[in-house]
Image (tube, helix red, strand yellow):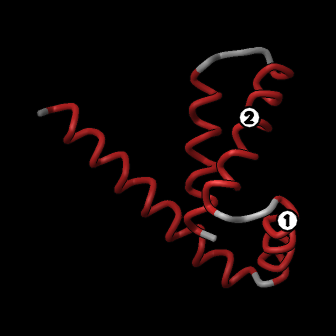
């Protein structure tokens, strides 16, 4: 779940940086999300069911989001180091 959400957040950020109109941004994000989910081997319906499950189990959801934030921070740090080289 963390890997899928990480990739989705990265896709969202890429679209956000394009500074498109909301409708265009949503359209592009929807296309990217399909590719992301395909790459991580998760269907849209499974993702939705998983999110529904974790909404009902907030302690587990909190742990997932803590790991997600840590993963994104680590990726950002690695990217920053790579730019410095």
Q: CA distance from mark 2 to mark 1?
A: 16 Å
Q: Name the element at disc 1.
A: helix
Q: Tell me: residue 24, above or below residue 32.
A: above
Placement of the C terminus among the 4 image quadrants:
top left
Specify the farthest residue to the left.
85
Q: Name the element at disc 2.
A: helix
Placement of the N terminus among the 4 image quadrants:
bottom right
Residue 36, position as x, y percentages in the image: 65, 49
Among the 4 quarters of the image, the one containing residue 29: top right
Q: Tell me: residue 45, above or below residue 20.
A: below
Residue 30, position as x, y percentages in the image: 80, 38
Instruction: Give the label on residue 5, or none.
Output: none
Q: Is the Cβ of the residue at disc 2 closer than 8 Å to that at disc 1?
A: no
Identify the residue at image location x=66%, y=83%.
60
Instruction: Give the label on residue 29, or none.
Output: 2
- 82 relative position to 6: left or right: left
Among the 4 quarters of the image, the one containing residue 47: bottom right
Identify the residue at image location x=86%, y=21%.
23
- 61 relative position to 48: left or right: left
Instruction: Give the label on residue 48, or none.
Output: 1
The number of callouts visible is 2
Q: Residues within 10 Å of mark 2 (few under 14, many from 20)?
A: some
């Amino acid at each position: 779940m963390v890997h899928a959400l990480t990739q989705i957040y990265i896709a969202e950020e890429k679209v956000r940086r394009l500074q498109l109109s909301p409708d265009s941004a949503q359209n592009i994000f929807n296309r990217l999300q399909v590719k992301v989910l395909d790459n991580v081997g998760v269907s849209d319906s499974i993702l939705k069911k998983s999110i529904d499950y974790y909404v009902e189990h907030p302690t587990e959801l909190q742990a997932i989001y803590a790991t997600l934030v840590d993963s994104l921070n680590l990726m950002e740090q690695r990217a920053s180091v790579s730019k410095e080289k």
